[in-house]
Amino acid sequence: MATPTDSCDPELVATIQDVTEGDILVVNDDHRTWEVTDVVERPIEDPTDERQHKRVLRLTSGQSVFGLELTEYADCHEATLHVLETTDWTEGNQTTAVHSVEILTQQVPWVVVSRTEGQAYHFPDPEAAAYGEAAPACGAGNGDSAFRIARITAVVPVYGGCKECLREDRPVTLEPVRCPSCERPICTGILRGQGVGAVEGLAITCPDQACGFEGVVDASLASGFS
């Protein structure tokens, strides 16, 4: 087997190496959201094999099961996606190169749950929450559905998180922001939306009148955002 000519981007390799069982992923910006149900580390001990190590992730989405394989060579890595089980016959036996992997953050302080104890908790729709209404970010349910807002600690691990809400809302923790002049705590919280990675700074006015700082401070997102 020849050594691949195209090496994976180092950030992509690091992301795949950070994935653990139970993580929720988006691969190659595909429409599906995958749950990691198994992770296998397999060293290659055959001296005639150019491969040195394999890391294989078992991914499930509905009835589909794929395998994401990160193969290490002496001077590069190769990431590929293999179809293991699928109900779509057009996908059978396909192998494709992996160019992006996103690990979706699941933990948020408040979630929306059905009063009739649905199978998954949802992230609150920000617009509905602004009007005091409980509605899922993914738009699940219908007009007759009854939802309530609850702390995530009240429902985890009873319910699993809604994969579609994760994909739609992209919640990312904002690291605590302090005034750079007097070190007064300003805010912390959750940033939500498809483009939160574009947020690099926050314009603040220090509430301490003796300080009076006004300006832009760095906005740091919690590690794990990609």
Image (tube, helix red, strand yellow):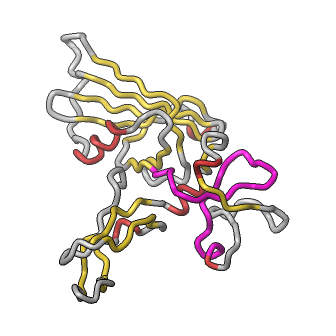
Whether residue 27 sits left or right of residue 41 in the image: it is right
Query: Residue 43 lies in what quarter of the image?
Result: top left
Q: Residue at x 43, y 60 (%)?
A: 172
Q: Quadrant of the N terminus?
A: top left
Is 36 drawn above or below residue 168 in the view shown?
above
Q: Residue at x 39, y 38 (%)?
A: 19
Q: Quadrant of the C terminus?
A: bottom left
Q: Position of residue 130 (x, y in %)?
A: 61, 78
Whether residue 193 sits left or right of residue 218 in the image: it is right
Q: Residue at x 37, y 41 (%)?
A: 97
Q: Position of residue 23 (x, y in %)?
A: 47, 41
Q: Residue at x 65, y 57 (%)?
A: 150
Whether residue 94 sits left or right of residue 4 in the image: it is right
Q: Position of residue 80 (x, y in %)?
A: 38, 36
Looking at this view, name the residue that lies furthest to the front.
210
Q: Is residue 196 covered in magenta?
A: no
Q: Is residue 106 covered in magenta?
A: yes
Q: Position of residue 197 (x, y in %)?
A: 36, 65
Magenta range is 104-129
Is 158 drawn above or below residue 214 in the view shown?
above
